[in-house]
Amino acid sequence: MESPQQRERARCRVRVSARPIDPRSLVSEVSGPPSGAIALFLGTVRDHSPGRQGITHLEYEAYEAHVVGRIEEIVEEATARWPINAVVVEHRVGRVELTEASVAVAVACAHRPEAFEAARYLIDELKARAPIWKKEVWPEGEAWSPGS
């Protein structure tokens, strides 16, 4: 599931895939002469969550028919609010091991405040609105987690 798009103001790409996220390639992809700031957010798998220790990995599922479109809507909102030169959003599906990135947002703008604000908006809205579900797995069991 991938959607490369050229916008008048911003280069944008959204991908939801089992493929590992490569932070260096994201930074390279959004880099460019008009951008003096790149904000990169990586959400990584940790070994605990509220009330639970010993998580060994996560498993993500997405509503494939709608997930890319929903994230693209969020990206469009961000490009309308901030002067974004380029943005890439990637989210994993399938099994994701401890310390691996499960989600990434890279935003390039001329200045730091806009890059940080846009990246924060993108990850917060993605977690709230994208049809992606997370299962936590630990030695004694597994459970779907509220929120992605």
Image: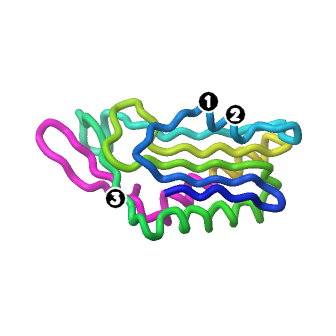
Tell me which label, 3 or 1, sits earlier in the chain.
Answer: 1
Residue type marked 2: Ser
10 sits left or right of 68 in the view: right
| Viewer-nearest of discs 3 and 1 | 1
131 sits left or right of 12 in the view: left
Colour treatment of the image = rainbow
Image quadrant assignment for residue 133: bottom left
Image quadrant assignment for residue 96: top left
Determine the CA span between mark 1 and mark 2. 6 Å
Q: Which mark is residue 73?
A: none
In the image, the segment drawn in magenta is: 121-148
51 sits left or right of 122 in the view: left
User: Residue at the spot x=38%, y=50% of the render?
Assistant: 93
Tell me which label, 2 or 3, sits earlier in the chain.
Answer: 2
Residue 43 drawn at (x, y percent): 48, 41
Is disc 1 in contact with disc 2, using a CB cutoff of under 8 Å? yes
Q: Which mark is residue 28?
A: 2
In the rendered structure, does residue 130 fall within the stretch colored magenta? yes
User: Residue at the spot x=78%, y=57% of the render?
Assistant: 82
Determine the CA span between mark 2 and mark 3. 33 Å
In the rendered structure, does residue 144 fall within the stretch colored magenta? yes
Q: Secondary structure at mark 1?
A: helix
User: Residue at the spot x=69%, y=65% of the render?
Assistant: 76
Q: Which mark is residue 146?
A: 3
Residue nearest the observer in this picture, 23 or 122: 23
Q: Which residue is mark 1?
A: 24
Q: Secondary structure at mark 3?
A: loop
Residue type marked 1: Arg
Determine the CA span between mark 3 and mark 1. 30 Å
Residue 38 drawn at (x, y percent): 73, 38
Quadrant assignment for the C terminus: bottom left
